Amino acid sequence: MIWCKMRALEYVDRGDCQNAVASMCSDISKHEKTSDKTGMLSMMGMMEIDKGASAVRRWINGFN
């Protein structure tokens, strides 16, 4: 999961919250243990985009 977070946080660091969420969701969908939860997690991530970079960063860092 660490590589997913690192990749997504690179987008946040560039101010691109939309692609940060998209990146995290894309990577989550590729893992067998999380692929069935992609839709719900994507919706949660999209709700954070309008709140700004710090909210998206918290959302990404919330994954273990």
Image: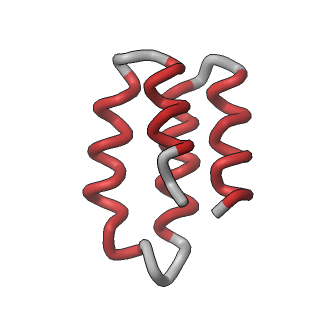
Q: Which residue corresponds to the image point at 66% horizontal and 36% vertical from the top-left?
A: 9
Q: Quadrant of the N terminus?
A: bottom right
Q: Quadrant of the C terminus?
A: bottom right
14, above or below 62, in the image? above
Q: Which residue corresponds to the image point at 52% horizontal and 43% vertical from the top-left?
A: 60
Q: Which residue corresponds to the image point at 63% horizontal and 42% vertical from the top-left?
A: 8
38, above or below 54, in the image? below
Percent coordinates x, y for residue 51 in the rendering: 36, 17
Q: Which residue corresponds to the image point at 56% horizontal and 43% vertical from the top-left?
A: 61
Percent coordinates x, y for residue 11 in the rendering: 66, 31
| 18 relative position to 8: left or right | left
Number of marks present in the image shown: 0
Percent coordinates x, y for residue 12 in the rendering: 63, 27
Percent coordinates x, y for residue 21 in the rendering: 49, 40
Say how the picture is coloured.
Answer: secondary structure
